[in-house]
Structure formats: C-alpha cells, structure tokens
Amino acid sequence: MVLVSIIVTEVVRPKPINWRPSYTSQSKIPFGCYILYNELPRLFANSEVETVKESIYDFMIKRDMTIKSNYLLINNNIQLDKQETNRLLDYVQKGNDVFIAASSVSYFLKDTLNIELNTAYSFKEDTVIVSLSHKKLNHSKFNFSRGASKAYFTSIDTANTKVLGHLEFVEENGITSNKKEIITVPNFVKTQFGEGSFFIHTTPEAYSNYYLLKDNKDYVANTFSYLDDSPLYWDDYKKSGRVVIDSPMRFVLNQTALKWAYYLTMVGLLLFVIFKAKREQRIIPVIKPLENSSVEFARTVGILYHQNKDYTNLIQKKLNYFLANLRNRYFIDTSTLNEKTIQQLASKSGKSIEEVKQLLELILQLKNKTVHNEQDAIMLTKKITALKK
C-alpha cells in the first residue's frame, strides 16, 4: 500500500515549472519562444519567415547574401567561433541586418564591433525596467520581475553605434548597507557595419513566453520595428534548449532513411532472439585460442636460409622489403637511388647524410653483385637496423 501510495502521489502531483532558458521555437516553457515564433508572421506581415536549423556558417555559405534580409538570433548567450563571426560580419557588410537578443555575446563579435557588455548581480531577484529611446516609442516602460538579467553595455563605438533603449534597476551598495541607487544603462543599440546594421539587445527574457503573456508584447513589437520588410531568418540552432543527440549513432538517427533502417534492424534482431530462444541450444564446444606462431615461423625460415646458405636470395628479399618500407613510410621514390634520394631519406629519417649515403652505396653495390656471401648479409642487416633506430 505504501508503494502504491508513492506511485499515485508521483503520478498526480503537479509537474514543476521548468525555468531553464530554452528560446527554441517549439518550447512552451516560460523562457521558450513558442509564442514569439508563431507571432512572427503577424509582426512581419510583409516578410517571409524561414527557420534555420543549422549553424550560421553552414546556412550562409549556401545562400545568396546579396539579397536583402534579416537574421534573428535570440538566446541567453550567443557564442560564435571565428568562422561563424566572419560569415555574419560579411552578411551584414553586404547590406543585411542582424537582430541579436542575448545577455552575453562572443568575444570575436564584440571585439570587431568595439562594444563591451557587463552583467550586474545581486543576492535577491529584483525588478528591471526597460524602455526605448525613440520619442515615438518612449511613452511607456516595461517591468521584468523574474529571471531577467541585468546585462548592459559599458562601452560602445559612438561613431557607428546608436543607443535605442535603456535598462533601469536598483543597485545595492554592499551586503549590509541599506543604500540603494537607481542605475540607468543602455541595453539596446544599433551598430552600423558596412552597408548593414547589428541590433543588439541584452535582455532576451523580453522575447520569452513568460513576458509575452504579461502584456509586454508592445515592447517586443517596438524593438522589431527597426527591421524592414525583408525576408526574415529565425535561428533555431544557437539555442540553449536545442536537443542535441550525443550518441555515436547521431548521424544515423538524424537521417530519416538510416534511422528507419536502424529501427527495423533492431526489431528484426529482437524477433530473431525471441524465436531462436525457444529452440534447444547445442553444447558450445571449447575452442582453444590460436597460438602466436609468427616468431617460430620466422625462426624456421631463418634456419632454412642459414642451412641452404642462399644469401643472394635472402639479400634480395631484405632489399625489396626495405625499399618498400621507404616508399610506404617516407613516401620516397626508390625506382632510382641518387643524390635526391639521399637528401630526402636523411631529412625524413633524421640520420646524417653520410650514414644514409653509405647505406645506399652498399645497396647499389649488392644489387650489382650476382653472388653474395654471409658477410654481405650481416653488413646489410646492421646498416638497415642502424637507420631504423
């Protein structure tokens, strides 16, 4: 009864709210972007909205970026490598616009745009107030009371950057001090780059489901009013809530045909095991592991050569094996042994030119002889062994 009570309690109890940042188009948790994504066709009524589910580099390398468009990046942080940053900068330089809503941005992008960001932290969760600077849009302020980051710009390039909005919050001076100071700092800027612009907003929570349901939709619409009616690309790849398959089978599972082939194979194997298990199993014989006889084989072959004293055949095989080793290991052409061969072998093997020259001269000498003796075989073996050390 206790066990049943525990199970029933776990089943019927309310599911806890997931407050983790996601910002994906399919996420309906508080800090997802399901509402915003589905409202984009209304916000950009004259624009075509396309969802991007691959990296910025892979997406932009396949598109004609000379056609005017907008790229929308919303996440709690946007981290781009050098290749992605260069593609994004090239995209904007050609006359396109990028809208970024993130509390932190990668170093490469900040360094290029000459901007600096900072985040104020406090021991308790405070309300932040955001507003826009434009005289037609600054008639109201919007409050964010839960989960909103206090990220703002500490430095901007005034020659190319214009402040579009501000963030206001209360800063406490010390842990035990009761002194409080209202701080107003920029949180929304437009940075001109080439023929296009970057719009960077440091409060991505404003675009989440939680705040769009709290009558803050006008603020979001006003921030998007700086974008024109060009085609809009919604980035659904650079998201904290993006589902990433870490399995070694991720490539197979990402391909529809391979995924179904894999599932059918697993089902077939399961059915095979089920029906095969009903049959009587025969006794499994004990199989002794194979012995490693390679050393004994080499010793036997060596004894045969020694007994027959066929040093000419032995030297020819050693030379063929050694020259094949030079071709496979050092990628040296051994069809003609000359000064070029000496230089290449010396540089790649780390041996002196004199040592390599003596070995190759010995090889040429042995090749020209028709009959060889035991001393020739011993000398050749010593020279080859010295080169391989």
Image: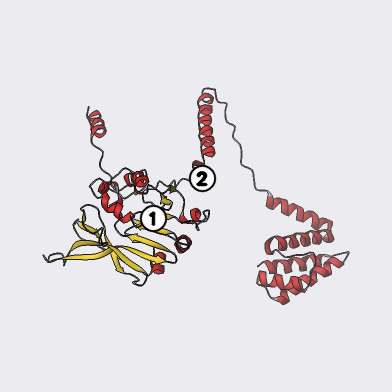
Where 26 falls versus 56 (above or below)? Answer: above
Instruction: Give the x, y percent position of residue 179.
Output: 12, 66
Quarter of the image where the C terminus is located? bottom right
Instruction: Give the x, y percent position of residue 110.
Output: 38, 66
Q: Which mark is residue 251?
A: 2
Label 2 vs 1, first from the N-terminus:
1
Amino acid type shown at disc 1? Asp
Amino acid type shown at disc 2? Phe
Residue at figure coordinates x 84%, y 61% from the top left: 312
145 sits left or right of 232 in the view: left
Residue at figure coordinates x 70%, y 66% from the top left: 385
For mark 2, give the secondary structure.
helix
Name the residue that disc number 1 marks.
228
Q: Which mark is residue 168?
A: none
Where 263 falls versus 201 (above or below)? Answer: above
Q: CA distance from mark 2 to mark 1?
A: 38 Å
